Image: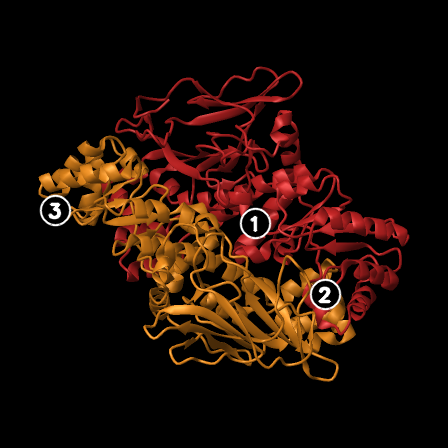
Chain colours: A red, B orange
Amino acid sequence: MLQAALASGTAHRRAVFELFPRRLPEGRRYGVVAGVGRALDAIERFTFDPEVVDVLREHGVVDEPTLEWLAGYRFDGDVWGYAEGETYFPYSPLMVVESTFAEAVLLETLLLSILNHDSAIASAASRMTWAAGDRPCIEMGSRRTHEEAAVAAARAAYIAGFVTTSNLAARQRYDVPTAGTSAHSFTLLHDTEKDAFTAQVTSLGHGTTLLVDTYDVAEAVRLGVEVAGPGLGAVRLDSGDLGVLAQQVRDQLDALGAHDTRIVVTSDLDEHAIAALAAAPVDGYGVGTSLVTGSGHPTCGFVYKLVSREGPDGEMVSVAKRSKDKISIGGRKYALRRRNARGVAEAEVVGIGEAPVDDGDDRALMVRLVEKGTVVGRESLETIRARHAASRAELPMKARQLSRGEPVIPTLHVDGHVDGPTDGQVS
Amino acid sequence: MLQAALASGTAHRRAVFELFPRRLPEGRRYGVVAGVGRALDAIERFTFDPEVVDVLREHGVVDEPTLEWLAGYRFDGDVWGYAEGETYFPYSPLMVVESTFAEAVLLETLLLSILNHDSAIASAASRMTWAAGDRPCIEMGSRRTHEEAAVAAARAAYIAGFVTTSNLAARQRYDVPTAGTSAHSFTLLHDTEKDAFTAQVTSLGHGTTLLVDTYDVAEAVRLGVEVAGPGLGAVRLDSGDLGVLAQQVRDQLDALGAHDTRIVVTSDLDEHAIAALAAAPVDGYGVGTSLVTGSGHPTCGFVYKLVSREGPDGEMVSVAKRSKDKISIGGRKYALRRRNARGVAEAEVVGIGEAPVDDGDDRALMVRLVEKGTVVGRESLETIRARHAASRAELPMKARQLSRGEPVIPTLHVDGHVDGPTDGQVS
């Protein structure tokens, strides 16, 4: 595709690509944008080194002029988009890439991979942390997803309110707070459960978390307090009816004087299981599989479409394919979150060709991320995390409901000045 | 956990860990082991370089003796397991790691991440290629999964019978055959569809695949044959009712004399959609989202459990936690595929403590992968791909059914010599 466009000369036409969702995952009321920071890092690093060019040459993937062009490739265009942590809705223009066709089209798979993955994790994580309320959620799903996806998932979960991860690489790369845990294998390694608990408390102090369901829970809890004293940090339950068990363990801990010993639960939790434990005396949730797989929706289905490009006369032309089942809307987009006087979100307003007008209480959604090839939109993870909390808090109350429903606010398209004929545009 | 075990001295006890599934994804009849080759590469590379040790020190993750031990870490043990591409069933002992506790426990997340991900993709891919029969399946899901998971997914799909991938990194790293495609953006970039087709055919020859659903399919097909001649390689349909459209396009191509022009379909295909198109004149399937997300089952749920370890007297002791809802079986495992005289698989036979006896037509399943820290089980992707085809062909006919069902063969445990007391063992 690139080779053909380079040969015909159209590759260097100015072009606007848009990355957007056609819908939310079925039944979800909002989505969460994540991966923007990783995408910016990736754009900066995205070049074709000689080794890669050689592989393409060796296998005859593209011709010599294309290889030469790739060898000199560096993205020099502009990128605008939703700031990371922001909530999103169907047709939110999450990223707008302005460059030449050739430069921008090469970013398609890179940007989609990162945003589709990270946003899927953050969207699920946000529902979990909202369901958990003030109780901390701990990310521990690394073993249930690709080893590199695991690091990105830990980062995305933190953005959406998780407090720690078990993934040490996420600490190293992104400074996500980490927390470890002990496994059944640690208890089984020792000749007795008492030996295991004694080894753990001796090494890690009485503030540690003991896993108490390897053999008999009640006996393990008794033993834990015996070994660590009533100042034992926490116990972890990883099987059984967690609601019933948590109450039994709470009663036992209280009877033993261990009033401040926390109860952490794990075992295939998702947002629904977390919500169902709201009335149980649980102090923290460890979430694995369902977090890293997006709780039923492992990808967001974002697409990356050409929405405007230079015509033969040098003017920009809005473009979109004609398709009844896959709607795209031509034209460069702008967006704001319409809010009422109390600051509650009411609509996602997407301007086609020009920015929609702020009614006074609205909030512009798109920020500049890359300017003439230079990344300008980098932010700290703490800033992103705070943005997500604020953006979520601004949604109508029913956004928090876990039941299946429609997007919590509608998306409105405002057709302003359209910069050229709308050939093929679906509106 | 490691720190406590190092301090108490139990870290250096000999230990056997087992990686296994408790079940198949709901409704699936068999699973496919993938990721073994990547896991072997990862074991070989898995060390803690000074930079990583510094991060752990800086954040006080573990104490100084543990940091020293990690700095010198290299896996020196043995690994046995199912050869890559093999089919598997509940409780198949997919990997058995024999080493010290400390050495083996560190591999847990690494091995699980790789095998859980890659096997999920291969298991879905195998159903798709089986449903497609002789028609080729093309992997094009990179944009719908994490950017590194995408490369692993392309490799796993190839193992399970896909013929090509659009992921160029999979070519570079694993020599998976690649094939490109053109997007709607390429057509939209040009002033007319004819300009786009002419540019593509001029650059790539008449054997190329033209995307014909940007505007009007019938007009595009007519135009494609006009531009490329009746020797046009293929047309691609990416929207609409693919079965109906494929027949219309076939009729039109034949009427235009383009009898050998193939029809490739894409658009959210999964194994069920592929099967539903069996009667349509389709020559190839491009599969994206549902492949890279495991078609509803993005992870396999494999676990990694301590099943045997050295006791205080130096003898090995079988161990397993007691849990009603998460069954583990203690003891070192061996496995064979029981086959009848016609070579059809009848059962997965798992020996506890010793190898089950071959009835004459059976096939041993576990091979040596790592010997005293040295990888000995590396294979070519072609060998692995051929193994999968053979292993799948050996299953009872109903394995091919896409409807929900039980595992196509039962798993039988044979309790042979158990190497010590079975403390906590669930049988």
Spatial CA span between label 3 and label 2: 66 Å
- Looking at the picture, does residue A88 appear above or below residue A382? above
Report which quarter residue A395 is drawn in: top right
Residue A21 lies left or right of residue A232; in this view the side is left
Same-chain status of marks 3 and 2: yes
Spatial CA span between label 2 and label 1: 23 Å
Q: Mark 3 belongs to which subunit?
A: B
For the point 42% across and 73% down, the residue is B338
Q: Indicate the position of residue A352 as horizontal and vertical percent values.
A: 42, 22
Same-chain status of marks 2 and 1: no
Q: Mark 1 belongs to which subunit?
A: A
Q: Is the N terminus of chain B in the top left, top right, bottom left or bottom right quadrant? A: bottom right
Residue at mark 2: B1
Residue at mark 1: A292
How crowded is the residue under tag 1: few (<14 C-alpha within 10 Å), some, or many (20+)? many
Q: In this orientation, which residue lies closer to the viewer: B171 or B352?
A: B352
What amino acid is labelled 1 in the image? Val
Q: In this orientation, which residue lies closer to the viewer: A215 or B389?
A: A215
Residue at mark 3: B259
